[in-house]
Image (spheres, coloured by chain):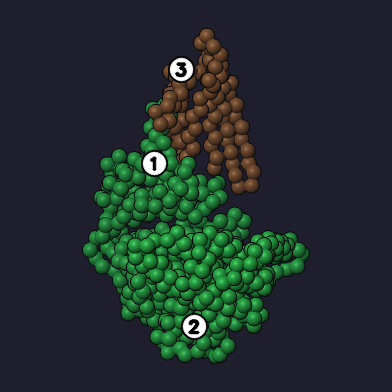
Chain colours: A green, B brown
Amino acid sequence: MIHETVNLLSASLRLFTSSNPNDFEKIFSKDDYIDNLKNLIETECFSNFISEKALTKRDLNDIRALQTIAVNLERIADQSVNITKQLGYLENPDFINRFNYTQMFGTVLEGLESVMPIYEKRDLQGALDICKREPLTDRLYKQNFDKIMEMFADDHPNKDLVTTLFIFRYLERIGDLILNIGEALILAIVGEKIKIHQFLSMQSNLEQLGFDGSASDIDFQSILGSRSGCRISRLGQGKREVSKTKESIFKEGNTHKIRTEKESLETWNTLFPGLAPRVFSYQEGESTTSMLVEFIHGCPFDEILLNGEDESLNNALFVLMETSREVWLSTRKEEPIATDYMKQLQERFAHIRQVHPEFYRGEQDIGFTKVLDTGSLLQRCREIEKELPAPFSVRIHGDFNVNNLVFDPEEQMIHYIDLYRSRQADYIQDISVFLVSNFRIPIYEKILRDRLNQIIKDFYVNATLVAAEWHDSTFDARLTLALARSFYTSTRFEHNKVFAEEMYLRAHFLLDKLLLFANLGRPWQEFRMNTTVLYY
Amino acid sequence: MSDKQDFIFESLQDTQTIKGYLESILEGLEKGKIILRSNGEEICLEPANLVKLGIKARKKGTTRKLTMKLSWKEEKGVTISSIKQLDIVN
C-alpha cells in the first residue's frame, strides 16, 4: 500500500510538468486500488480480535499502528487525487511552475518511503524524523502562500492563483497525514500513544538533566491514565543501566496546572522530604508546560486494595492513617477557615447533568411533606456552610483519592502523588474524598466489597478520633457537606446507572438531614451524621 | 389525549423520615384526599371506601424489599383508576 501511494503521489508530481491524459486515468484507478488495500488491511487488523490467538500488548499496538497507517495512506491518496483534479483547472498549466512544489513533494515522498524500513527496524529516531516533516511542509506551504498573496496584491489577480492555493493546501494536508503516520510508528515502537510535541518537550527536559543519549535510549511505560488531564509516562532504564533515582514521570499539560503542581511538590518536599515526588526538571512553554518528576516506587493504594493480601492492606492503611495524622498535626494552623464544599459541587453540576441528566430532584409534595428541589437544597446548604467554618486548617492533598497514594512496603512509607490541588484547607476535604474514592470503586463482589467497607470504616473511625482529640465539634456537619459533595460529583465518572444513583441518593439524603437539623435551630455540635451512608 | 398521570418519588431515607412520609399519606387516607405534587403538576387521589391493600415482602441475597400497594377505582362520571405504590427497599 505504501508503494502504491508513493507511485500515485509521484504520478501526480509528474503531471506538474507534463500533462499526459493516461496519467490522469492511472491516478484515478490507483486511488480505487488503494481504497481496496486499506479495506483489506483494516479487515485483517480487526480479524485479529475475533481469532482465538491471545494478543500481547505489543500485538495490539502493532495492530493499532498499522490500521492508522493504512487509513492515513488512503487519505494521502485522496489528497493526491484532489491535487490532480486541481491541475486540470489551471488555465495556464505552466503557471504552477512559478512556485516551489518539488521540495514539498520531496519531503512527503521521502517520509513515505521510509515508513516500512522504520517499522521493521523499530527505529524511533526515524519515526521522529517522519513526524518532523509536518512542520517542514507547513513552512514550505507558508512560503508559497505568501507568494500567492503577494501576487494577488500585485493587481493582476489570476484565476490560476486560486487553483494554485488549493494545490498547496492539499500538499500541506498530506504533511499532516504524514505526521499521523509518524505518531503511529512511535506507538508501535515505544508502545505508548504520544504526540510528537510531547516527545520533543520530554527530550528537552532530559537534556536539561544532562541526558545525552538518543531517543531510543529512553524506555517508556505507561503507568497511569490521564484523568487529570496530564499525560504521564515513565522514563526508565531502557537499554542502559540507570540508577533508580533517574526514573521519572513526564507530565505535560496546561501551564497553570503544571506550575501549581510543581510549586506544591516543592512545598511538600520542604515539609516532608520523601512524601511527594521530587521535581527533576521543569520547562514552561507558550501554551503547555512540562516537567519530569521522580517516579515513586511502590504499589498504588488501589492495587493493594483490590489485589493485596489482607495483611499488606492493613499495613498500608495503618501507615496511611499514621502519615495523614502526622501531616495534619504538623501543618495545623489554628485560625478557622471557610470551606466551599457546596460551591465545588455547584461548579461541577453542569458536568454531572451532562452525564446523568436525570440526577436532579424536582420540587415535590407528598401530602403535607414538602421535598425541596436539588437546586434550592444546594443553595440552602451553601448558606448553612457559611456558619460552619473549619476550626483550624491543615495542608491537604487536595485529591486524596485511592489512586493518588502509593505505598512502598520496603520503606514502610506512603507517598502522595498528583498534588496540584494541594493547599491549606479543612482536613475533612481529604477525608471525604478518600472515603468516597473507596465507596465508588465499581466492585460488587461481596468479599471485595466487605474489604472496601472495612477500609472505609477504619479510616472513618481514625478520623473521628483525631476530631475528638482536637475538639472539632462541627466535624459531623462538615463531613456531611463534604461527603454529599464527593458522592454527587463522583456520579459523573460512573456510567452504571444503578450504582451512580446510589451515590446521587446518598448526597440528597445527607443534605436533607443537614437542612432538617438546621431548621430545628439546635447547636451544630449536636448534629450526628448517619454513618450507614458510607457503606455499600 | 391520555388521562394517565404519574407521580414518582425515589429517595434514600432513615426510618424516622420514612415515618414522616407515611404519616403524610395516612393523613390523606383519613381525610379521603392524598395530594401529590411534582414540579407544579398535581395528582389528587381520593381513596374510595373500599381500597385493595397488598403487602409483599422479599429477601434476596442482602436485599430486603417490602412493597405496600393500595389500589381502588374512583368513579366520577368516567372511571379512572390510580395506583399508588410504595417501595421500601433496604
The amino acid type found where label 3 is placed reads Gly
Residue designated by label 2: A247
Q: Do the residues labelled 2 and 1 touch (CB within 8 Å)?
A: no
How dense is the environment of label 1, judged by Cα within 10 Å: few (below 14), some, or many (20 and up)?
A: some
**Residue at image point 39% right, 41% down:** A374
Q: CA–CA distance between discs 3 and 2?
A: 75 Å
Q: Which chain carries label 3?
A: B
Q: Which chain carries label 2?
A: A
Relative to residue A508, is residue A336 depicted above or below? Answer: below
Q: CA–CA distance between discs 3 and 1?
A: 30 Å
Residue designated by label 3: B32
Residue designated by label 1: A374
**Residue at image point 24% right, 65% down:** A334
- The mark that comes first in sequence, 2 or 1, is 2
x, y (%) of residue A499? 54, 49
x, y (%) of residue A202? 45, 79
Q: Select label 3 or label 1 by which is in front.
A: 1
User: Element type at marker 2?
Assistant: loop
**Residue at image point 64% right, 43% down:** B60
Describe residue A189's horizontal placement relative to residue A461 as left or right.
right
Relative to residue B20, is residue A394 depicted above or below? Answer: below
Q: Select label 2 or label 1 by which is in front.
A: 2
Q: CA–CA distance between discs 2 and 1?
A: 48 Å
Say yes or no: labels 3 and 2 on the same chain.
Answer: no
Most foreground residue, A296 or A108: A108
x, y (%) of residue A439? 50, 56
